[in-house]
Image: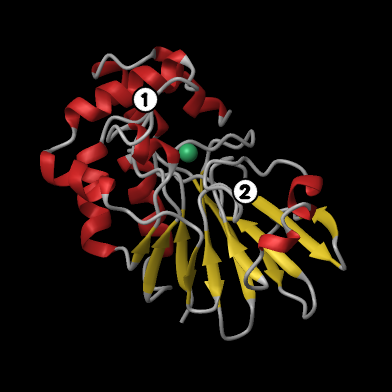
Amino acid sequence: MPYLILSDIHANLEALNAVLVDARGRYDRIVCLGDLVGYGADPNAVVEWTRAHVAVVIRGNHDKACTGLDDLENYNPAARASAVWTRDALTPGNRDYLEKLPRGPLAYEGVDLTHGSPADEDEYLVTPRDAELLKPFLGSPLSFFGHTHVQGGFVLNRGAGRRILPNGTLTLQQGCQYLVNPGSVGQPRDGNPRAAYAFYHPENGVVEYRRVEYDVGGAAAKILAARLPEFLAARLYEGL
Ligand code: ZN
């Protein structure tokens, strides 16, 4: 049975619900690569759902920012405003849960889970060259990462990196190393506004990339009603 890989939900309950409807009956456990909260207007609902349903979670930079584990110095104004809003909105129990999330990379059933990169949980993996430089840090042939909100990832073949285009399924080849990004559930930034996620089929080494439409208007209206920066609502329509 495959498992469901989610990342960067960012307190977007509408996107999360659409993913769960799309994936229903097709997985037996869920892993999450961090950034449960920040940007979106439903931090408590998303954290409560995660606590009840997700097998393993690592922390993202926004989870740290919203609990005070990270200072907000390197955040742009919209990200900082949403971190402060989220900090106030979280219940003490949910804040405590986020505070105690483990740091990646975390080994899980033969794969590595990381938020940013296996070398640094806050690093953005953007180019094939970024992936090539990580060779000494790769513990297993397959790592899952998030943070960039761009679905796809990278493959290393004899040390040379190549971008993976997320078209349907990816069959892992022996001898290569893979850094796979399922994309962002709650705030895609690859020009496609549909919620992104992936399945991993460990029995035959296949990653399946998925996109699903969700109620963008509903999520955006909640962001505006919470008086979060308008830009955070607008960008959901563009997927940027
Ligand atoms: Zn994120």
Amino acid type at image mark 2? Gln
Q: Is residue 148 above or below residue 238?
A: below
Which of the two labelled residues, at mark 1 and mark 2, occupies the earlier sequence position? 2
Image quadrant where residue 228 sits: top left
Amino acid type at image mark 1? Ala
Is residue 95 left or right of 175 when viewed as pictured?
left
* Mark 2 neighbour density, 10 Å: few (under 14) some (14–19) many (20 or more): many
Q: Position of residue 68 (x, y in %)?
A: 29, 32
Image quadrant where residue 81 sits: top left
Residue pictured at 12% horizontal, 40% vertical: 92
Identify the residue position indicated by label 1 in the image: 220
Residue pictured at 64% horizontal, 79% vertical: 205
Which label is found at residue 151? 2
- Tell me if residue 112 can be seen: yes
* Mark 1 neighbour density, 10 Å: few (under 14) some (14–19) many (20 or more): many
- Name the element at disc 2: loop
How far separated are the C-alphas under marks 1 and 2?
Answer: 22 Å
**Farthest residue toward the left?**
92
Of residue 52 and residue 147, the one placed in the foreground of this image is 147
Q: Position of residue 182 (x, y in %)?
A: 56, 54
- Name the element at disc 1: helix
Q: Position of residue 153 (x, y in %)?
A: 68, 53
Ligand 1 lies under 8 Å from the Cβ of mark 2: no
Asked whether the beta carbons under mark 1 and mark 2 sit within 8 Å of each other, the answer is: no
Residue pictured at 52% horizontal, 47% vertical: 121
- Tell me if residue 221 can be seen: no
